Each structure stands twice: as C-alpha cells, then as structure tokens.
Amino acid sequence: MSDHPAKISPVILSGGSGTRLWPLSRTGRPKQLLALTHAETMLQLTARRADDAQRFTSPIVVANAAHVSQIETQLAKVGVEPASLILEPVARNTAPAIALAALIAEPGSLLLVMPSDHVIADVDAFRSAIEAAVPLAGEGWLVTFGIAPQAPDTGYGYIRAGASLGDRVQRVDRFVEKPDRPTAEGYLAEGCYFWNGGIFLFRADAYLQALDMHAPGIAAAARASLEQARCEGRRVFPDADAFAASPSDSIDYAVMEKADRVAVAPVDMGWSDVGSWDALHEIAMKDAADNAHHGEIVAIDTSGCLIRSDGPLVAAVGVKDLIVIATGDAVLIMPRGSSQEVKRAVEELKKTGHVTLDRPSP
C-alpha cells in the first residue's frame, strides 16, 4: 500500500440523528455513537478502518454540531484526531455534507466517504476494494462501492454494474430504487446487481465539478457557508443561514445518478447498515436457541429473540421471536420481523413531545 504516494483522505459522515433503533438511539446520542456490535462505538470502528497512517490522512468529520463533544471524546479514545471537524448547523442530507468536506480538502485529494454507522466485518476486503478503485478515482471517476447482496432485500437501493473498467471495477449502468421482492429476486438471479451502501471514493475536485453541473444550488450554498464560517481550532462552523439555504438532497440523487463517469467497485465485506433491530439480530452472535442478548438477561424456554438491556435485568420466559430493548427510562417490545414499525412508537412520542426522543438513553 505504501507504493501509492498520494494518501487517501477519509471523510466520515456523522450527521445522523435517527431513531430507528429507539429507545437506545436518541437524537442526543444517535446510532453511530453507540457500541452496538463491539466494545467500540460504530463511529470508532469507522475511523479505525482508515487508521493506516501510510495510506490515509487524518479524517475530515462532518457532524451534527450537537454531538461535537461526544465525537471528539470517542475519536480521542481510539487515537484519532480529525484534520477538520465540520459542524453542520442544520441537516441537509449527504450531498451538501460531502460538499463541505470536498471544499475543505485539497482539490486533487482522493476522498473516501464513509457513513459512520455501518458495520464492515471484513476490513481487509474493504481496503482491497479501495485499492482497486484508486486508479479510476484518480482519473476523475466517481466510484461507489457495491455491496455483494446476501438476500433479495427490499430495504436497499441497487446498482446495476456494466462493462469492466479494470481490475474489479465496472461502469455503473444505472441506480435503481428499492425493489419489491420479486424484482429483488430477479436482481440476485441476474448476478450483476449490488446493494448501494453509500460509500464512495473520488477526487474532491471531481465531485465539486459534478455538483456544479448537476446541483449548483448545493455547491453555491456550501461555498457561501464556508466563506462565512467560524473556526475554533479544528472545529469549523459553516454559516447557518448560508448552509440552510442549500437544497436537501442525497449524493445519489444530486450527483451519482446524473454524472457520466460513475463506476462501481463490487465488494463482499460483511456489510450492514444496522438499520433496524432485526438487522442487529441478524448480525449479532446468538446462543443455541437463536437468541441474541446483551446486558443482564435471563432467558428460559425462549428462542429467536433479541433481548438487550442497558438498565434493568430482563427475564424472558416461554417467548419466541421477540425484540425486547430496555434502557433506564424506556422499554420497547415488538415481534421480530416488524422492527421497522418502531417508527410508529417514535411518531407517537413526537406528538406528545416525550423527552425519551431527545435525551441520551440512561
């Protein structure tokens, strides 16, 4: 890896404040700041995927300003000091967030854009795919990493890979929206479709040129917000009014689906976006009865459950296929297989302004 003179600059996107893993994940401490699959948090694990100082620079982190202290503390614990910590005053989706990072970076630098809340079990496979993508990215291509699909999942967008552009990299024929199950089964049978994992490699200037062409409003707002930014050491505070004027759009819609030179590097690396409690059960270590558990748990004649307690002891007797999540101030119970429905509980709590949505879980 040291044969490459130009280092790659990681860009870690940590602006999310989702509640799909409520009651553990809250707007005050979202999923990426939690230790869900290892002793380290998802943010820490993301940073460590690019901790080879010979190959990667210090990361640029784009984050929610409300989480800055937690982010700095967590990264310091794994020996990572960001080159810049860009603090979004408001959320405007991934295209504007990445624009901020690209404007801060050196124009010709290669940016490895990584969401901070994904699981990658095989980091060596990921790094190998990065190396395969480097030559094209260096030539100005926008490269996305296509996740080898493990099932006909209807919860992900897909990428159709086309002609070969080199070793383990192909032109993107098209991006497709989340399919229904028969369509997803057809994609798997065809063999040239990959999950869209939202991880990218490209030159900073190539991304900004594409953004200027296809989403000029986003590019202009990002530039204006940084021209008027306030800096405190490594912390960068874009101007709130200028950044709020940006359209809110994902990198996929704003750029990747419209640009001409877009490539995909397929990779099988044990990836999950841990987008639900069911997804966590799927990737977690399980006992002989197919239970995944964390915390002080007693399970008797119980099978197929995800039981997690960060607070009280939970005793489960004679139940199966349940999700049980307990914190110090809330308990969630629902059938396994329907964990996307946690949004109904969240919506009800929003109506009442309940504090469990905003404050970190005890």
Image (cartoon, helix red, strand yellow):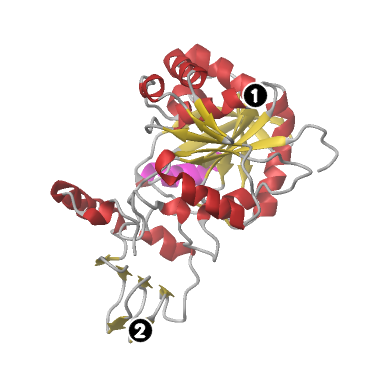
Estimate the x, y position of residue 267 in percent, counting from the top left.
Answer: 62, 46
What's drawn in magenta, residue-wise?
182-192
Q: Position of residue 243 (x, y in %)?
A: 41, 23
Q: Amino acid at mark 2?
A: Ala
Residue 114 visible in image: yes
Residue where numbered disc 2 is placed: 299
**Could you tell me which residue is drawn at 43 percent across and 30 percent down?**
250
Taking the magenta stretch, the answer to whether it contains residue 188 is yes
Residue ranking furthest to the right: 3
Position of the N terminus, as image quadrant, is top right
| Residue at the spot 59% in from the left edge and 26% down from the top edge | 104
Mark 2 neighbour class, 10 Å CA radius: few under 14, some 14 to 19, many 20 or more:
some
Residue reaching furthest to the left: 352
Please name the residue shown 72% across and 22% down the image. 139
Q: Is residue 21 above or below residue 298?
A: above
**Crowdedness of circle 1 by 10 Å Cα count: few (<14), some, many (20+)?**
many
Q: Secondary structure at mark 2?
A: strand
Q: Disc 2 versus disc 1: distance between alpha carbons? A: 52 Å
46 drawn magenta: no
Q: Nearer the viewer, residue 187 or 168?
A: 168
Closest to the observer: 296 or 58?
A: 58
Residue under label 1: 141
Residue 166's quadrant in the figure? top right
- Spot occupied by residue 59 in the image (x, y as percentages of width and height): 63, 40
User: What secondary structure characterizes most of the magenta part?
Assistant: helix
Q: Marks 1 and 2: in contact by CB < 8 Å? A: no
In the rendered structure, which amino acid carries the disc numbered 1?
Answer: Trp
Most distant residue in the front direction: 232
Instruction: Work out whether mark 2 precedes mark 1 in sequence or the reverse, and give the earlier one.
Output: 1
103 or 192, which is in the foreground?
Answer: 103
- Side of 220 relative to 154 (left or right): right
Tell me: 333 left or right of 259.
left
